[in-house]
Amino acid sequence: MTSNQRQIEVSYDVSNEFFRLWLDENMHYTSASYLTGNETLEVAQLQKCKILYDYAEMNTDKTVLDIGCGWGANLQYLALDRGVKKADGITLSPAQAAEIERRKLPGVTAWVCDYKDFQPAQPYDALISIEMIDHLVSPAQAKDGQAVDIYRQYFSKVAQWVKPGACFGFQAILRNKVPRTKKDLLDLQFTADVIFPGGLNPRLEEMITAAHPAWEVLEVRTQRESYGKTTAEWYRRMQLHEKEIRAKWGDQVYDDYDRYLSTCVRAFDNHWSSDVQMKLRKV
């Protein structure tokens, strides 16, 4: 990954308890899927999992790998809500892997591992990945024209981990357009450099291009408004815990995440950013 383990720890290892304060009860740190707009965050997150479960053409007897599995929210959905017998995950965050171990999910195994170094013991029946690809390409690499090649290397590599005809439920944050004011540009740069160092959100056209020739793109669903609702709810919940966060983790952590989350809300509202869910099938 372009984002190395140290950078991933900056993004995700502040404290599991810190994130537990303002994420949903299962700690999804990716866009939920609001289908009516009136759901709770918890319901919308499960709807996200179901969409990707269906895109991966999963059932209880199929094996699946969650690439960039976070704290295990989607693995928990697979194991407990859907009864999948074997669901594996990889992450670069030791704190996230520790949380998955704490949950003791039946049939679930997670490793701290760079996807470039991962070698499955046997081919999987399906793949799921939720906003992990945003860590693959740095701003410098994108500026140098390397983005599509790096994304294509990723899609080609993970295709080697599955059986012929396997499906992939894939989700990514997208960058759509560049804001025009200096403050907005600085806030986006802060988010990239301080909260998520080493990564960059891809463009939709890059994902479509890079998926070939390893994967056929069967369905594409964008959900900009859903991510706007998701980040707005995270921000609301975090603000409710301001005193506790400042007391336990310090003013800098609170101020940084206040700036980051408020920037995210504006980004989705103003079409600077979006989110995509794709159904891919191995060629």
Image (spheres, grey):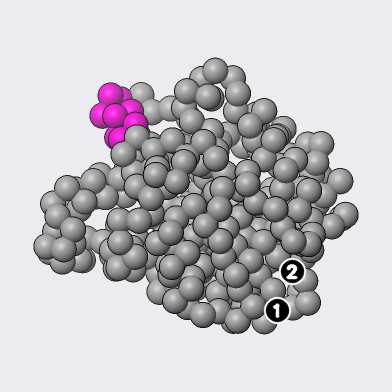
In the shown orientation, is residue 265 left or right of residue 217?
Answer: left
Q: Amino acid at mark 1?
A: Lys
**What range is drawn magenta here?**
181-190
Rendered image: mark on residue 85: 1
Residue highlighted by disc 2: 63
Asked whether 154 or 217 is in front, the reply is: 154
Q: Residue at x 57, y 65 (%)?
A: 110
Asked whether 49 or 265 is in front, the reply is: 49
| Label 2, label 1: how far apart the Cα atoms are | 7 Å
Dot 2: within a 10 Å radius of its alpha carbon, few (fewer than 14), some, or many (20 or more) residues?
many
- The quadrant in which residue 111 appears is bottom right
> Against 33, is 5 above or below?
above
CB under 8 Å between discs 2 and 1: yes
Q: Earlier in the sequence, mark 2 or mark 1?
A: 2
Q: Position of residue 260 (x, y in %)?
A: 30, 45
Q: Amino acid at mark 2?
A: Thr
> Against 276, is 33 above or below?
below
Dot 1: within a 10 Å radius of its alpha carbon, few (fewer than 14), some, or many (20 or more) residues?
some
Q: Position of residue 106 (x, y in %)?
A: 60, 81
Q: Residue at x 44, y 55 (%)?
A: 93
Q: Main secondary structure of the magenta part?
A: helix
| Magenta residue check for 158 | no
**SS for callout 2:** strand
Can residue 140 be seen in the rendering of this structure?
A: yes
In the shown orientation, is residue 133 left or right of residue 187?
Answer: right
Rendered image: mark on residue 114: none
